[in-house]
Image (tube, helix red, strand yellow):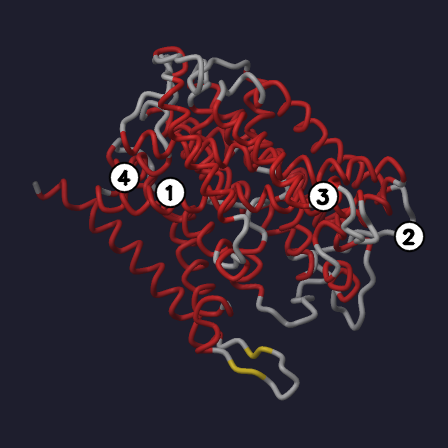
Amino acid sequence: MISFFLCLIALVAGYFTYGKLVDSTFGPDDRETPAVRINDGVDYVVMPQWKLFLVQLLNIAGLGPIFGALQGALWGPVVFLWITCGTIFAGGVHDYFSGMLSERNNGGSISEVTGNYLGGAMKNVMRVFSVVLLIMVGTVFAKGPASLIVKMIDPAGTGTGLLANGSFWLAIILLYYFIATFISIDAIIGRIYPIFGICLIAMAVGVIFGIMTNPAYTIPEIWTNFYNMHPKGTPIWSFMFITVACGAISGFHSTQSPLMARCLKSEKQGHFVFYGAMVGEGIIALVWAAAGCAIYEKTGGLSTGLQESLAGGQSAAVYDVCIKTMGSVGVALAMLGVIACPITSGDTAFRSARLTIADWAGLDMKNWKTRLALTIPVLGAGAIISQLDYTIVWRYFSWTNQTLAMIVLWAASMYLFREKKNYWITAVPATFMSAVSATYFILAPECLGGFVNQKTAEGATIYNTMVAYPIGIIVAILFLGLFLKATKKPAKA
């Protein structure tokens, strides 16, 4: 339990130390923000700082720091190090710059921001990539909760009655998404998100309190379990870094930060809203990772108990943790978590998709007819995709999510270079994530793993790390070299 508290203290200290360093490197000033200058009453709306923080937290969190952290706990308490260091030196930096660079570019979507610093070709790639990714995220976060609601109402699976029909609840959720995507950001999102944000925090507090007060549960120490505890022997590098995305660094966050960048009253709120929300998410992820490590039994030093729980589905595992740590109170919080939280990430995903297309086409979102003309096809695409079997395609999300984070960090590095500021603060995590993304792409079954890995007679995967690790390092060095070469060009002019 000592390692858990040391990591917790490090996260809080990181906000006040490294977070301030990041903030001072960027250099917020007293210029008029887009929320004040544009203020269209729809997407550009001034909101109080406390509300900005809670909305940002729920935008970037949802179930990410819960599901990802529980999956990450399969590797054992070593995951605490990635959550802590990843949040402080990578995730917080990524979220801060994605929000503040959007703010400096009139609240532009992340595709427009990256294009401004990495060129027109990257802008077009990011436009298409972002819209497809956001619609996919929104669709998944509609279909998942719909299925869970049906499971609650009809546990026997009889399928009788309208309320036991998944399509009915999917339609209801998509209708809510339509309304939340279309109307002003402070009409629904600004009102109910802070409540759900508080509930997400309360859920984490309840879990850790339940662990600490139950003598049957002990959070293992990092130094006595510093090895790979994954039952399948899945390598820590780079699978753990990809799996624990939202709890350490996630490219999806960069699509959400512009929403709050359009609502800042002052640039000086950025440290608390963007970096602070990421630290908050890191703390939530740390708690859930600790739960995964503490509650379930180990067999032969491997996380077999947690693996068995996760085999029943991530939502079932969340429910199980809440019951074991909080009892009947945990049931209500668990249902809120696995149903409400993904819905609150889904509606902002569709909203971000609308804004990305609007920025792409240069459309004014103050006009309700224009807004409606974009909202209908965006939600229509989500409704169509929800009827397709996209399970295999969605498996690519893990890789594309972290690759997006890598691109945003390189864009931030180029911005800092142009501003003659310390670009290493973003270039180092960008290089690291380049290695992570490249290595995962080589090893993952949904990518090139089927070609480079082998199988044992029992069907277990033998990962070809001898090939993947060097390639990942070479790719990272190549990207860093290209960036450094780009920084020399202006000097020669």
Q: The residue tagged with tag 1: helix, strand or loop?
A: helix
Q: What amino acid is at disc 4? A: Gly
Disc 1 residue crowd, few under 14, some 14–19, many 20+, Cα 10 Å: many
Circle 1 residue: 408
Q: Which mark is first along the chain, 1 or 4? A: 4
Q: Residue at x 55, y 37 (%)?
A: 346
Q: Earlier in the sequence, mark 4 or mark 2?
A: 4
Q: Which residue is mark 2?
A: 216
Work out which residue is located at the far left of the displayed protein and give it: 493
What residue is disc 4 on? 115
Q: Nearer the viewer, mark 4 or mark 1?
A: 4
The amino acid sitting under disc 2 is Ala
Cα separation, mark 4 vs mark 1, equals 10 Å
Q: Which mark is residue 287?
A: 3
| Residue 88: % across, % down | 53, 40
Expressed as whole percent of the image width and height from the top left, the position of residue 122 reads: 27, 46
Q: Between marks 1 and 2, how big is the CA–CA gap?
A: 43 Å
Residue at the (75%, 53%) spot, across then down? 292
The disc placed on residue 39 is none
Q: Quadrant of residue 192?
A: top right
Q: Are marks 4 and 2 in contact (CB under 8 Å)?
A: no
